[in-house]
Amino acid sequence: MTKQRVLSGIQPTGNLHLGNYLGSIRNWVEHQHNYENYLCVVDLHAITAPHDPQVLAENSYTIAALYLACGISVEHANIFIQSHIPAHSELTWLLNCVTPLNWLQDMIQFKEKAIKQGENVNVGLLDYPVLMAADILLYQADKVPVGEDQKQHLELTRDIAVRFNHQFAKTKPVLKLPQALIKADGARVMSLTDGTKKMSKSDPSDLSRINLLDSPEVIQKKIKKCKTDLERGLTFEALDRPECRNLMTLYMLMSGKSKQTVADECQDLGWGQFKPLLTEATIEHLRPIQTKYQAVMTDKPYLESVLRDGKNRAAAIADRTLAEVKAALGFSTPL
C-alpha cells in the first residue's frame, strides 16, 4: 500500500520552542513511519520579516539538526532547505497569477503582522500564503500538519488548487487538494507570560517561551517567573484560568502522564509546589534532544549529506509538478 505524502516546514528564525515541538515536530516523529515525509526549512518565508543575513544560513542548519535531534529519521523523512529548490519560487509566481488579491488581503495573519510592521510591511508578507501554497502543492501532499491558527492558510491552498484546476486542468487535475493533519493535545501551546496568546518566536520577551536548546538553569528561571494566578488547586477545567490550563498541559506533555493522572496529582497543589515538578519534567524531556543536537552539529558532513539527499529527492517531485503546471498554463518547453 502506497503511503500518503506529508509536507511541512518551520522557519529558521532562531531556536525552536516547545510550541513548535509539541504543536508539530512531535506529531511528525510519532507518525513518521506511517507517511512519506517531506520536511522543509522554509528560509524563503523567513525573509518576509526583517532578518539578519549573517545568521540565516546558520539558523537553517540549526533547524535541520533539531529535526534530527527530536527524532525525525532519514529512513522515513526527506529534510531539505526550501531555497535550495528553485521550483518553490517559480511556482509561487505562477500561482500569484491565478490568486485573487482580495483572498490575500482577507488573511487574518497578514492583518495581524501588517499592524506590527507598520510602514515596513512588504509584498512578501502579503504573498506569504501563496508561497506556502506552492510549498505544499509542489509535492502533491496528501496531508499537512497544521495548528488551529494555520487552518486558514491550508484552506487558501485548497482554494488556489481548485481555482487552478478549474481554469487550466479541468479534464485532468494537476494539483492535489491537501488535507489537514491536526493533533489535539499540544496543538496550541500558549505563552508563559500570557496564557491567552500563542507561544511564539516573534514575542520580544524570551521569557515567554521555553526553547528546545535552553539550559536547565534558563528553563528553571523561565518557569519560576512565568505568569500564574492567586488560586490554590490546579485544574484543566477552569476556563477563566488560561495560565493554569496551559502550564498543566505542558506538564502533562513533558512528563508523559495522562490528563487524569496530572489532574489528580495537582488538584491540591499551590504554584510553589507545582513549578518544580514542571521544571524537572521539562529539563528531563529536553535532555536527550539537546544531546543529540550537539552530536549532529559537530558532524557537519553528515548533516550536509542529509540535506543534499533530501533536496535531491524533493526536487525530483517538485520539478515534475512545476513542469505539469507550466504545461497546463501553455508555456513552451525549454529547448
Image (tube, grey):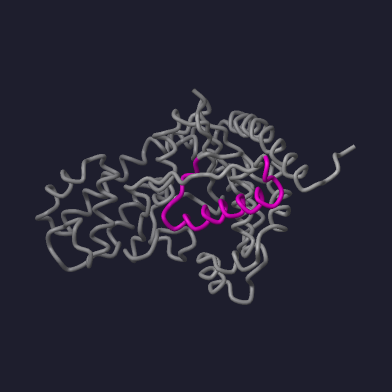
Looking at the image, which residue is at 32% across and 47% down?
185
Q: Which residue lies furthest to the bottom in this view?
A: 119
Q: Residue furthest front?
A: 171
Q: Where is residue 25 in the image (x, y as percent from the top left)?
A: 44, 42
Q: Is residue 17 left or right of residue 121?
A: left
Looking at the image, which residue is at 63% across and 33% down?
304
> How many numbered marks, from 0 up?
0
Looking at the image, which residue is at 33% across and 47% down?
184
302 or 318, which is in the foreground? 318
Q: Residue furthest top?
A: 1
Q: In which quarter of the image is residue 95?
A: bottom right
232 or 214, which is in the foreground? 232
Q: Is residue 140 above or below residue 3?
A: below
Q: Is residue 92 left or right of residue 271?
A: right
Report the quarter where the C terminus lies. Answer: top right
Q: In this view, does 14 lie to the left or right of 124?
A: left
| Magenta stretch encompasses residue 266 | no
Residues shaded magenta: 143-171
Q: Residue furthest right?
A: 335
Q: Where is residue 19 in the image (x, y as percent from the top left)?
A: 40, 52
Q: Is residue 267 above or below residue 74?
A: below
222 or 92, which is in the foreground? 92
Q: Where is residue 133 in the image (x, y as percent from the top left)?
A: 60, 51
Q: Where is residue 70 in the image (x, y as percent from the top left)?
A: 43, 37
Q: Report the magenta stretch's main SS.
A: helix
